[in-house]
Image (cartoon, helix red, strand yellow):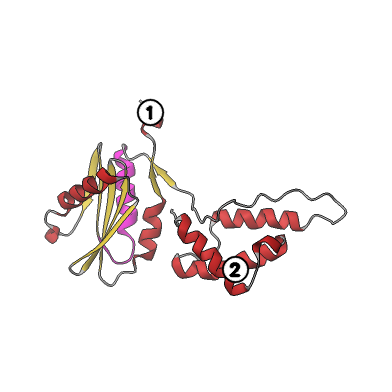
């Protein structure tokens, strides 16, 4: 995730249920399918740059269809609905200790429309491609990252710097910064950055 926070997911689902005038305690599998594929997906597209369903919702619809197809004479198999609404997206696990992984990530992010610079900073090395006039931006981002991490681990940091937008994905001791021009839509970039996760230290090859 990419991720949509639990609070945001709850608010989104409550809003959709309210608009549809549905009581979740009274809804069967068929009604949940209609809600997910209709109003919920429409609302979700307003906040995330997606074309189809996100994987967790797609899997949930598949489970609901299976339950909906069970004949009434057959004992129904309980459908495992999430206890709390979530729009959590599958993370993209990266081993940033590998230079080729860092370079590949930098090149991928640099291809997004409106991106004018990318920096990947890790304890194992860094990859930086920023405009010449960006000055001490990596040092400033590094300082901000350390200060933010002192309080508690953070996921995303966003700010506007002059005529540019700065997005920083914090991942423990590592961070990824993307600088985009002021006309760029940050939605796709924030969506991609939220999916990034570093491979746990204990899982790295020795």
Q: Which residue lies under the disc numbered 2? A: 17
Question: Residue 90 at x, y = what percent?
Answer: 49, 49
Give the residue displayed 65% in from the left and 58% down from the top: 61
What range of the chain is rendered magenta? 98-116
Per the image, label 1 sits on a secondary structure element best described as loop
Q: Identify whether 126 is placed above or below 179.
A: above
**Number of residues whose C-alpha sits closer than 10 Å to that of mark 2, classed few (under 14), some (14–19) or many (20 or more):** some
> Mark on residue 94?
none
Question: Residue 33 at x, y = what percent?
Answer: 66, 63
Question: For this rendering, which residue is in front, 126 or 171?
Answer: 171
Give the residue displayed 13% in from the left and 59% down from the top: 132
Question: Residue 23 at x, y = what percent?
Answer: 66, 66
**Number of residues whose C-alpha sits closer than 10 Å to that of mark 1, classed few (under 14), some (14–19) or many (20 or more):** few
Q: Which residue lies under the disc numbered 1? A: 205
Give the residue displayed 46% in from the left and 58% down from the top: 7
Give the residue displayed 61% in from the left and 70% down from the top: 38
Specify which label sits upstream in the sequence, 2 or 1. 2
């Amino acid at each position: 995730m990419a991720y949509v926070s639990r609070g945001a997911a709850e608010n989104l689902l409550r809003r959709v249920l309210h608009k549809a005038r549905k009581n979740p305690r009274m809804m069967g599998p068929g009604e949940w399918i209609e809600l997910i594929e209709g109003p919920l997906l429409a609302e979700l597209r307003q906040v995330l740059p997606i074309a189809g369903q996100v994987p967790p919702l797609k899997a949930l619809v598949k489970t609901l269809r299976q339950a909906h197809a069970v004949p009434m004479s057959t004992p129904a198999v309980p459908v495992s609905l999430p206890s709390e609404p979530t729009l959590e997206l599958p993370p993209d696990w990266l081993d940033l200790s590998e230079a080729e992984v860092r370079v590949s990530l930098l090149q991928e992010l640099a291809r997004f429309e409106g991106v004018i610079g990318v920096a990947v900073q890790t304890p194992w090395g860094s990859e930086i491609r920023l405009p010449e006039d960006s000055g001490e931006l990596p040092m400033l981002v590094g300082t901000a990252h350390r200060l933010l991490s002192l309080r508690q681990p953070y996921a995303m940091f966003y700010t506007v710097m002059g005529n540019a937008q700065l997005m920083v994905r914090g991942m423990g001791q590592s961070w990824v910064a993307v600088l985009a021009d002021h006309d760029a839509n940050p939605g796709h970039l924030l969506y991609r950055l939220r999916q990034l996760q570093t491979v746990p230290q204990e899982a790295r090859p020795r």
